Structures are given as structure tokens and as C-alpha cells.
Image (spheres, grey):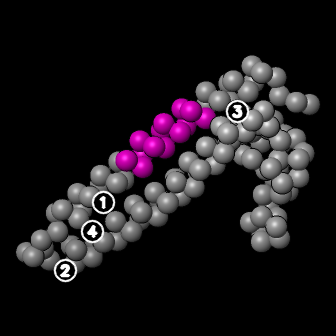
Amino acid sequence: MALKPAEIEKFKEELLKLKEKITGAINEVKEEVKQLDESKGYSQHQADEGTDDFGKTINMEVSSKEYGILRQIDRALEKIDEGTYGVCDVSGKEIPILRLKAIPYATMTVDMQDKLEKGLL
């Protein structure tokens, strides 16, 4: 059953809010990493520097995952504009509404997502 225009509009609003939230989180991480880089000095103890480097690595990994979600959100918004939101990019089948409620930026059915993650696509 195809999504109704009101449902699509609700998902679009949710996606835009999520995009704003993630963009803000990414900007915060960038600022933290920048501050860690600026705080390094010759007088800092090696252990402190190692802790800062570890924190910077963790922040960058989290940021990388957020960038991935941001790309998926952008794709879902593109699909809304194209009129294909709720349709799997790979199989062309409808994505169940329960999946979209759980992951509004989903662009594939669970089956296709599973195959992609296993390297079968």
C-alpha cells in the first residue's frame, strides 16, 4: 500500500529535524577536535596527549557514522522529491511502514539491506 501524501510530509518533517540534529552534533565534534588540536603544547605530558588522541579518534569515528546517516537522510529526502519515498532502491518493492517509522531514512527493504551488508549485492 503506497504512502499517503500526509504520511510522506510527516516523514519529511522528521527527516529534516533529524538532519538538523545530526548536523549540529557533527559541528560539535568538529569543534571539540579543533579544541583538542589547539590545546596541544610542548609542556603537555605524553599520557595526556595519548588520552587526547584517543578522544579525538573516538570523536572522528562517531562523526564518520553520523556522516553516513546524513547521506542516507539526504537520499531519503531526494526520494521524497522524486516521488519514490517508501520504495526500495534495489528491489523496487515497497518498504514496510513499520521499517520507515523505525528508520525514516531507510531506502531499502530489510532483505536488500541485509544482502548489501553481507556483500551479496
Give the mark nearest the N terminus, 4 or 3.
4
The residue tagged 4 is: 52
Characterize the magenta stretch by its predominant secondary structure. Answer: helix
Dot label at residue 46: 2
Q: Position of residue 64 (x, y in %)?
A: 49, 60
Q: Nearer the viewer, mark 3 or mark 1?
A: 3
Cα–Cα gap, marks 1 and 4: 9 Å
Give the mark nearest the N terminus, 3 or 1.
1
Q: Position of residue 37 (x, y in %)?
A: 23, 65
Q: Which SS class for mark 1?
A: helix
The residue tagged 3 is: 81
What stretch of residues is rendered in magenta?
A: 15-27
Cα–Cα gap, marks 4 and 3: 43 Å
Q: Amino acid at mark 3?
A: Asp
Indicate left or right for 46 with 80 as reference: left
Cα–Cα gap, marks 2 and 4: 10 Å
Q: Amino acid at mark 2?
A: Gln
Q: Which SS class for mark 3?
A: helix
Q: Amino acid at mark 4?
A: Asp
Q: Amino acid at mark 1?
A: Val
Above or below residue 9? Residue 100 is below
Give the mark nearest the N terminus, 2 or 3.
2
The residue tagged 1 is: 33
